[in-house]
């Protein structure tokens, strides 16, 4: 019985995985089994941290808004400002409010005066 040479499909699959892990260190970029394990681990971490990143940015925006509000005595607290924003139906999200608070404080004063009226 003659020897059968394997096709290129398995090799193509392995090279695709190797390209993904080419920047990993040590055996994580050389051995096929550890490459697949590290790929799964990397994708799980990426999926988990996408949600974490959204949370962290929201926390950062809230902290920035709260710091400017308390520093300049516009309001006593962040929660009161957001509550009154919703009451007056001024639809500004936290990202935009944080940018306004840092870059253009006079605009934030105008918004707070609009809410107080």
Image (cartoon, grey):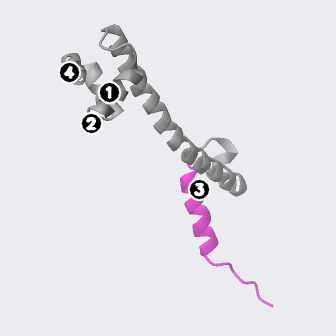
Circle number at residue 84: 1
Q: Nearer the viewer, mark 4 or mark 3?
A: 4
Residue highlighted by disc 3:
18
Q: Is residue 56 left or right of residue 21?
A: left
Label whose residue precedes the other's in the sequence (2 or 3): 3
**Contact (CB < 8 A) between labels 1 and 3?**
no
Which class describes the residues within 10 Å of circle 1: few (<14), some (14-19), or many (20+)?
Answer: some
Residue in front for this viewpoint, 74 or 87 = 87
Q: Quadrant of the C terminus?
A: top left
Which circle's residue, 4 or 2, is located before the other in the chain? 2
Q: CA distance from mark 2 to mark 3?
A: 53 Å
Mark 4 near mark 2, Cβ–Cβ under 8 Å?
no
Using the image, tell me which numbered label, if any, was put on residue 109. none
- Report x, y in % for residue 63: 42, 21
Does the magenta portion include 44?
no
Q: Residues within 10 Å of mark 3 (few under 14, many from 20)?
A: many
Sequence-wise, which precedes: disc 4 or disc 1? 1
Q: Please state if 32 lies on the left or on the right of 108 as rendered.
A: right
Q: Quadrant of residue 106?
A: top left
The N terminus lies in quadrant: bottom right
What's the residue at 52%, 42% (across, down)?
51
How many other residues sit within 10 Å of disc 4, few (<14), some (14-19) or many (≥20)? Answer: few
Q: Which residue is mark 2?
A: 89
Which mark sits nearer the N-terminus, 4 or 3?
A: 3
* Vertical side of 5 occupied by 54: above or below: above
């Amino acid at each position: 019985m003659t020897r059968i040479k394997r096709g290129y499909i398995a090799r193509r699959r392995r090279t695709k995985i190797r390209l993904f892990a080419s920047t990993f260190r040590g055996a994580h970029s050389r051995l096929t089994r550890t490459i697949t394990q590290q790929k799964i681990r990397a994708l799980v971490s990426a999926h988990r941290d996408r949600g974490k990143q959204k949370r962290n940015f929201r926390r950062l925006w809230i902290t920035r808004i709260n710091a400017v509000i308390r520093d300049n005595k516009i309001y006593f607290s962040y929660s009161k400002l957001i509550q009154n924003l919703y009451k007056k139906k001024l639809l500004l999200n936290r990202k935009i409010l944080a940018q306004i608070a840092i870059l253009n404080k006079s605009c934030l004063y105008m918004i707070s005066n609009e809410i107080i009226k």
